Each structure stands twice: as C-alpha cells, then as structure tokens.
Amino acid sequence: MNKQKKSLFLILLCVLLTITACSKEDADHGDVNEEDILATVNGKIISKEEYDKALAYYKDYVEYQYGEEAWESEARPGLTYREYYEDYVMDTMTYRLLLLDAAEKEGITATEEEVQAQLDNFKVFFQSDQDYENYLQQSGMTEESIKKELSYDIMVNHYVLSKIESLVPTEEELKTLFNDLKMNVQVRASHILLNTEEEALKALERINNGEDFAEVAKELSIDTVSGANGGDLDYFNYAKMVQPFSEAAFSMEVGEVSQPVKSDFGYHIIKVTDKIVNEEKTVETEKDILTEYYKTYKYEELLEKLEKEAEIVKR
C-alpha cells in the first residue's frame, strides 16, 4: 500500500460509519438493482457496493497493521480477519440502520448548524482544502452526500442519548452489577490456549502428570504472547476477559487448574496464581464506572429490542 493510500484509509476509518451507510433515499430500493442488495432493514437497504467499500477499508487497515498477507491469516483460532470483518461490517451497518429508522419514527432531526459543525470536524482530518477535494473525487462523493450522512449520524446520536443518557440506575441495580462484575477482586492467572478440546485435554493430562504448567504453555499455547511468559496474563479484572474465561478464573482457588474452558478464541487451560480482594472498593467508590456499564448494557438491550421488532432480510 502506498503512502497516499495509507493516509487516506486512516482518514476514512475515522468516519467509516458515516460514509458507508445506506442513505434514506434507498428505502424504496431507488436505483439499486435487486441483485446488488445484500440486506434490507425495515425497508432500508445495505448495498453490495457500500458493504464492499467498508470491507475494503478494514482490509487496508489490517494489512497496514499486520502486513500484506494478514487479511487471510487468523485473527483468532479458526477465524480469519476477513471472516471476522465480513460479519462485523454487516452487523455495524445493520445496527446503524435500525437506529436511524427508530430516530426517524420518533421525528428526530438534525439542524443545519449541527451538520455544519460535524462537517467542519470531518474536514480537520485533511491537511488542506485540496486534499479534501481530492478525497471527494477519489471516493465518488459530494459534500452534500457527506452532509446527508452526517445528519443521519446526528439523528442516531440524538436518539441513543434520548434513550440511554438520562437513565439512572437504582442502588440495587448498581449493587447487582458490582457483585456480578466482582469489582473489588483482581485475579492473576496463566493459561494455555489450544484450538480443540482434544488438544486441551491432552495438555491438561500432562500437567496433571506433573509437568510444569509454564513449560507446557511455552510449548503448546497458540497465544504466543502469553505463551512466551509461561502463559502468564498478569492481574486482570472480571470485565477485561471474555465471560467464559472470567467466569472460570474468578470461581477458582489460587493454585487450581481448570478443565478446558471454551471461548471464541479456542479452549483454555487456566491456572489461577493469585487473587486480590480490595476492601476499599465499594459500590459508592465505583459508582461512575458502574453507571457506564449499566448504560452500555441498556444500549445493548435497546439494539436487541430494535432487532427483534425489525423486518431484516439478508440475501
């Protein structure tokens, strides 16, 4: 990838959801051929052209970060970067249209002043007016089409804020979150990550027969970063790891070795090496963090509700 293209895609990634969204005028399928429609969300379309454009930007990003051949390499066991972003882009575009549709139904709009302010922020990414004009030409967009998409983003943001930002959790809800997330506990653990349960069971058998956990991790773990350190993951809180991993690690005693634990990354053999309980952390001291978690969960519930009630057709 040449230097100009690298600079361009870094700019594009900053506004990816804006410039790759399907426009409101596409609701009736407009000038898009049926065979070029990948999905419809309450009548609004996700076109193959816009989907492919978004995916191409992520491909550039992955190759820029990890090398020219990285797109088809594993992001996690059994899943390439390409496969991961194929689902991610479709989900992201679907959720945006769900939120846009909900905003429109509630009569939410964006003012000219708001749109202009967002456009000014967008232009900051370009070093000069000429760079901006070059971008418009290369992307096949106009300033009006960008302003239109920016207005949709503003509408979505207004809608989400109206549903989420004003929510105030009760003390009981905060307490439940505090306990569920084990906010006053940190665990230190090591793990051996393997592709299959069979491989994990064989590794566990070696450890149970007296082999050193760290040496087995160095030899077998497909998490090569921690594997080089004998599987050590240092201290972490409950929310930092994927749920199956944290659920197992935080329920174990120091020195205990787990049975294989399945996550999206593969199968883990976990050994807890330390556990710290901080009695100074309470619901009150962690209230701000807990409130943000609460709003995040409510946002996820909102998306699930909109998705459940929507008419989504994927082709």
Image (spheres, rainbow, N blue to C red):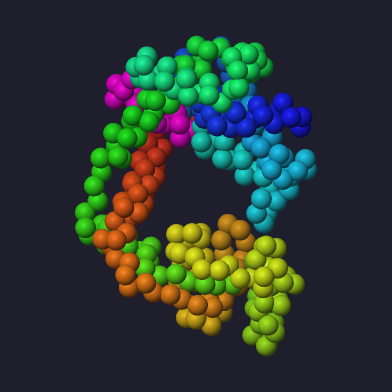
Foreground residue among 128 and 51: 128
Q: Give the range drawn in magenta.
A: 94-109
| Depicted 239 relative to depicted 139: above or below | below
Q: In terms of secondary structure, what is the magenta stretch mainly?
A: helix
Q: Does the magenta stretch include residue 66?
A: no
Q: Position of residue 13 (x, y in %)?
A: 58, 32
Taking the spot 77% from the left edge, 40% from the top edge, the residue there is: 68
Q: Quadrant of residue 263?
A: bottom right
Q: Position of residue 121 (x, y in %)?
A: 48, 24
Q: Where is residue 163 in the image (x, y as percent from the top left)?
A: 29, 37
Q: Position of residue 64 (x, y in %)?
A: 71, 39
Taking the spot 64% from the left edge, 70% from the top edge, the residue there is: 231
| Depicted 226 relative to depicted 168: above or below | below
| Depicted 279 relative to depicted 135: above or below | below
Pick the quarter of the image with the C terminus.
top right
In this view, the residue farthest toward the bottom is 210
Side (left or right) of 219 relative to 49 = right
Taking the spot 44% from the left edge, 64% from the top edge, the residue there is: 238
Foreground residue among 181 and 7: 7
Taking the spot 33% from the left edge, 67% from the top edge, the residue there is: 281
Whether residue 44 is visible, yes or no, is no
Side (left or right) of 48 relative to 18 = right
Whether residue 122 is visible, yes or no, is yes
